[in-house]
Image: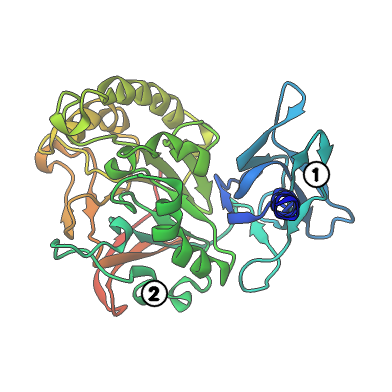
Amino acid sequence: MKRFLVLCMALCAAFASQAAEFLYGPYVQALTEDSAYIVWITDKATYGWVEVKGDGEKGAVKYTESHLGLMHNRRVHRVPVKNLKAGTTYEYKVFSQEEKNGKMDRPISLATNAHGKKLTFRTNDRTKSEISFVMVTDIHYNHVGSHHSYVEGYFENFITPEVLAGKDFIAFNGDMVTQMSSEKSHFEKLFTSLHKLLDTHNTPFYYVRGNHESRGNYAQKFMELYPTWTGMPYYMFRHGPVCFIVIDGGEDKPDSDIEYYGTAAFDLYRENEGKWLQSVIESEEFQTAPYRVILSHIPLNDNSWHGGRHAWKHLCQRCEDKGINLMIAGHTHRYRFNECGVHNRTFPTLEFSPRHYLDVTANSESLTILVKNGKGEVVNTYTYKPNTK
């Protein structure tokens, strides 16, 4: 019996001494001309930091996540990286270090992705003559179910490494999930195949929150996984000749709807978002952009459900006569184009479905949007000239 107890104690000690491990990531968020967030998740609470080295720089700079002078000790790490140079490629390496019994364990680190390539990102650059990106929407965890528009194996069959080759980024226009039920389901259902795909080119991504990202027990963790410099799911970024305004339309139904069990307060949320939007459209970054594009999961107009109508009133009307070339939306699971003025739309709106993706290029001559099907065939083309005001 004594030997058994000793063995059990030894096994418990060995188990307890296991080093922390990386579960998900790292990946880049909120990429701008001079900043980014690096995000990763470990299986245990650890202290995390990132070492970043730019092209031509001799040594790496260490960035930490801290508060009141103390580094955070947690599982979900989101390290802000600032004071970067526009249009510059940076190599980075992430570190996590666990505290055990008042002592620091050896740090674990990652310097390469799943394909063995160095972890890198390239900052945005408004002087870049041409940019291109891919946009997808309403994947719903590849859930086929009874809905005819869902696609199984979307990232394996639609958005291949060849599709992403040479692209500056990929944009997710909401409802990538059915609901945010848990960390494990979110990453295993969505992120595993997605992360392998993005690793092929170290492709950054931008996330537009959809109404289904607002549902589930894990929904409150959205900003931990996808941080932004506004601290909210709505934000703006500039790359090349395009200024992108990412709008969060919230939920599509009234706050009182039974779907939300009395927990929703999106009307006030959208009204506050409108105040932020007003400051954005007055900024130099927005007003000097040749192209201005709004990304919104829910189409915003007065013919939508409550959420779309309310957002149109408090958001879109602020952008009237502000040189918005186009709003790109999803949510309806169908492809259609609506001209400015239809149902009081403040600007043209392109809606697309999970059976399509957008291949977008912008340069000094035009902003060109190719709507493609799963075979990569062009369904339609939309072209916009740069703003003159």
Q: Is residue 12 left or right of residue 294?
A: right
**x, y percentage for residue 365?**
43, 62
- Distance between the Cα atoms at labels 1 and 2? 36 Å
**x, y percentage for residue 193?**
45, 67
Say how many tags the image has.
Answer: 2
Name which residue type carries label 1: Lys
- The residue identified by callout 2 is 156
What residue is drawn where x is 45% and y is 37%?
221
What residue is drawn where x is 79% and y is 36%?
101
Quarter occupied by residue 259: top left
Of the pair 313 and 229, the residue shown nearer to us: 229
Name which residue type carries label 2: Glu
Return the mark for residue 62.
1
Up/down of 239 relative to 319, above or below: below
- SS for dot 2: helix
Q: Name the outermost residue toward the front.
A: 1
Quarter occupied by residue 376: bottom left
**x, y percentage for residue 81?**
69, 42
Q: Can see residue 226?
A: no
Query: Is tag 1's residue or tag 2's residue first in the polypeptide sequence?
Result: 1
Q: Can see residue 175?
A: yes
Up/down of 128 relative to 340, above or below: below
What residue is drawn where x is 25% and y is 29%?
317
Quarter occupied by residue 80: top right
Up/down of 97 relative to 120, above or below: above
- The 10 Å Cα crowd at callout 1, few under 14, some 14 to 19, many 20 or more, is some
Of the pair 326 and 9, the residue shown nearer to us: 9
Q: Quadrant of the C terminus?
A: top left
- SS for dot 1: strand
**x, y percentage for residue 212?**
28, 44
Q: Is residue 143 left or right of residue 229?
A: left
Of the pair 124 and 269, the residue shown nearer to us: 269
